[in-house]
Amino acid sequence: MTHVATLISNPDAAALDQAALTRARDILPASAEPRWLAERIAADIPFNVAGENDNRVRGWAERLREAVGDRPIDVVVQPEANRRKRLLIADMDSTMIGQECVDELADKVGLKTRVAAITERAMRGEMAFAPALRERVALLEGLPVATIAEVISARIKLTAGGRTLVATMRANGAYTCLISGGFTLFAERIAAMLGFDESRANKLVLADGRLAGKVEEPILGREAKLAALKDLTARLGLSPDATLAVGDGANDLAMLIAAGLGVAYHAKPLVAAQAHARIDHGDLTALLYLQGYRREEFVPV
């Protein structure tokens, strides 16, 4: 078979059944019997077509989403070959964690609403990332550095399935990198909590144990994330189709498009519309099912 459609629901609200798989299979040409990856949570439907380009593959995914209707089931269509990836590069804020770190810091100085509005515009692609970051960081001037540890401890929540995703891919030979337009003081600790091989992020300027209201230049944003993907691919001697990237915001889009499989995870509309794949309902273990892993192959964490 040349292609595979993967249907996935959230493991905490399993919604996939045989009827949904049958409807999906009826749409796909020359399809084989569905194979469960996890009962009622995820299944593959292999099918066979010739000469499918990216637009046609996206069209199959849209038709399948229409077939499942309003049921909380994600659909991803991709070539069957090279599904297992050797590099994972993942955004941090609102992807591997559920929060935006700069917004949580702003809450400490009573400016969360103002800063979050700037964050939202930047993530939607409505304003350039670098000036948006500089504007937000300037509002944090004078905040004690110790506040960052307090925020991580009290407010930052790891996204469900993230540790399993990283552990399982690493156990199967993949390299993993957490990359963030946020700050190293967050990314380094969160990368360690999730089990990543490395992390890359922006550096805050500090003065006398407090934030100076500035970030070191050049700012790591959209183009730097793309450059990191290319750098790691070259360093590891991998072809682009061996890479998996995941993110939610406009500054992730270039790396998502360049990766072998770019996944928009609970993403902004602009990103979800352009990425190779989108996950709107599942947790981060969905990225393992997309690679053909069965539930029993997941590494326990």
Image: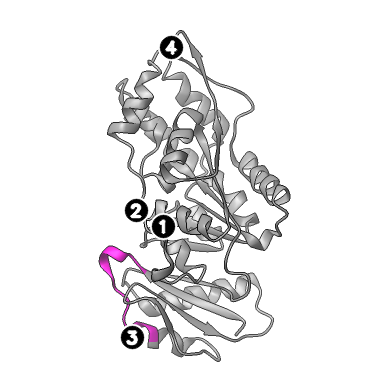
The image quarter in which residue 93 lies = top left
- Of residues 7 and 158, the one nearer the viewer is 158
Element at badge 3? helix
Which labelled disc corresponds to residue 110?
none
Q: Earlier in the sequence, mark 4 or mark 2?
A: 2
Where does label 3 land, which residue? 18
Instruction: Name the residue rendered at 44%, 53% in the picture.
Output: 267
In whole angstroms, how far apart are the C-alphas of marks 1 and 2? 6 Å
Instruction: Name the residue rendered at 32%, 86% in the picture.
Output: 19
Instruction: Name the residue rendered at 46%, 43% in the picture.
Output: 92
- Of residues 30 and 191, the one nearer the viewer is 191
In whole angstroms, how far apart are the C-alphas of marks 4 and 1? 36 Å
The kind of residue tagged 3 is Gln
In whole angstroms, how far apart are the C-alphas of marks 2 and 3? 26 Å
The image quarter in which residue 186 lies = top left
Q: Earlier in the sequence, mark 3 or mark 4?
A: 3
Does the magenta portion include 15?
A: yes
Where does label 1 land, which residue? 284
Q: Is residue 66 left or right of residue 157?
A: right
The image quarter in which residue 298 lies = bottom left
Where does label 4 land, which residue? 209
Where does label 2 land, which residue? 160
Residues shaded magenta: 9-21
Element at badge 2? loop
Element at badge 1? loop
Q: Earlier in the sequence, mark 1 or mark 2?
A: 2
